[in-house]
Amino acid sequence: MSVYWAAEVGDDWDDVAAEMERVFRFAREAATKERSVVFVVNADDLLGRRGAGSAMLATGILSATRTLALEGWRKGWT
């Protein structure tokens, strides 16, 4: 199992984009190896309570998680 802990980011778009790219690479590597993935984000970030950058990252990770789950389901992962 692979676990990704969301990093602390500010409101600078370049920081958010760089972290999202790390998330993508992490997920791609795990998917290639057919490993389970767990993404950990702060619940307050999902609600936008800790700044725009953190909210963008958390909701981006949530979206990526859903996509990864659907792709895995389509390929028969359990």
Image (cartoon, helix red, strand yellow):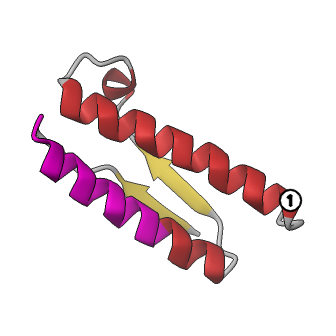
Residue at the (77%, 61%) spot, across then down: 72
**77 w.r.t. 62: above or below:** below
Residue at the (32%, 41%) spot, across then down: 57
Please name whichever residue, 70 or 47, is drawn nearer the observer in this view of the structure.
Answer: 70
Q: Which residue is mark 1?
A: 74
Q: Which residues are magenta?
A: 11-26
Q: Seen in the image, is 36 located left or right of residue 63? A: right
Q: Position of residue 69 (x, y in %)?
A: 71, 52
Residue at the (24%, 34%) spot, across then down: 54
Q: Position of residue 56 (x, y in %)?
A: 32, 34
Q: Would you identify the image quadrant in which residue 12 lies?
A: top left
**42 w.r.t. 29: above or below:** above
Magenta span has 48? no
Q: Seen in the image, is 11 located left or right of residue 16? A: left
Q: Secondary structure at mark 1?
A: helix
Q: Residue furthest right?
A: 76
Residue at the (64%, 83%) spot, across then down: 33
- The image quadrant where one finds the N terminus is bottom right
Q: Position of residue 62 (x, y in %)?
A: 51, 39
**21 w.r.t. 28: above or below:** above
- The image quadrant where one finds the C terminus is bottom right
Q: Residues within 10 Å of mark 1 (few under 14, many from 20)?
A: few
